[in-house]
Amino acid sequence: MRYMVKGQVHETESSDGTVIRYSSRGQGVPIITANGVANTTTFWHYFEDHFSKFARVICWDYRGHGRSDVPRDLDTFKVPCYSEDLLAVMDHAGLDDAILVGFSMGVQVILEFYRDNPERVSALIPVNGPCADPFEAFGSSETYKKAYTAVLNHYIEHPRLLELVGIPLLLSPIPWPFSKVEVDRHRCPRLEMDLYFEHIARMGFANEMRALLGMEEHSAEDVLATVDVPTLVIAGEKDDMCPARLVMRIFRGVKGAELFTVPHGTHATLIEEPDLINYRIEAFLRKNGLL
């Protein structure tokens, strides 16, 4: 599979021995990214190109995602376990602290990391992500929660039919036309989306469902009031996957946080408006003396 970030690849072991791989590019202040669920480092390649000119950019894959190994214990597709993976990456890279930038589920991961390691975080930049259950974007009733949890658990135990149909579909040209339901096809590059669909197929639906269930079970809402580092919250104006009410919960919960809403941005703002996002993040970091 093609990976679009250009940094040199390294590997380390997480706390349970799972091999985690990361790339490192550039010199200077360390900035570490955290991906969305069932995604790889692909969405960060514009970010890496920009910030590696004057910072050290580290992009890594969660356990069971991308270049990293699948864990022996399949019940560890959990946000706290990804936080342990991030700690292993930081230690192996020789970093005392870093700026953390999380996209989608990566927001939950960087907040969870802050919970246990606040002294190792110099700034937080949540992008298009919630602090807790992302499925709340589509409903919050107990009936709804029981229904989607049951569906996820069913396909974890019985993925064969879904994979027989879904994998050939994901590897075909069909998903791209339907992606316009969420992304702006006029601004969102097709290559990145094709690589995203390819990765889901390679990851396997059972493990994707495990990762989705792990997101649903997690909450870092209690962490928000404890955050004491510069924080820039980024949202997409037209993001239906993580709507404004979920993003605003982080903005209002973190004292002194800044909010930037990308005009017309969907859940794919990182690749729809990379220049706008990169320059806004750079301005935020320079204002806070972090670059």
Image (cartoon, rainbow, N blue to C red):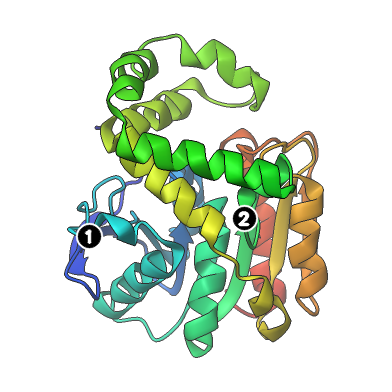
Give the residue at x 35% y 73%. Answer: 84
Give the residue at x 57% y 60%. Answer: 107
Instruction: Tell me how far mark 2 sits from mark 1, CA to CA.
Output: 23 Å
Quarter containing the N terminus = top left
Whether residue 232 sits left or right of residue 21 in the image: it is right
Give the residue at x 66% y 21%. Answer: 181
Answer with the quarter of the image where residue 232 lies.
Answer: bottom right
Tell me residue 88's x, y (percent): 29, 74
Q: Which mark is residue 133?
A: 2
Whether residue 131 sits left or right of residue 165 in the image: it is right
Q: Secondary structure at mark 1?
A: loop
Tell me residue 11's x, y (percent): 18, 63
Q: Nearer the viewer, residue 161 or 117?
A: 161
- Of all residues, the one furthest to the bottom in this rendering is 119
Query: Is residue 4 visible to the viewer in this orientation of the structure?
Result: no
Q: Nearer the viewer, residue 163 or 158?
A: 158
Tell me residue 139's x, y (percent): 74, 42
Contact check, label 2 and label 1, Cβ < 8 Å:
no
Q: Which residue is mark 1?
A: 73
User: Mark 1: which amino acid?
Assistant: Asp
Q: Which mark is residue 101?
A: none
Tell me residue 32's x, y (percent): 44, 65
Whether residue 204 sits left or right of residue 217 in the image: it is left
Query: Is residue 217 visible to the viewer in this orientation of the structure?
Result: yes
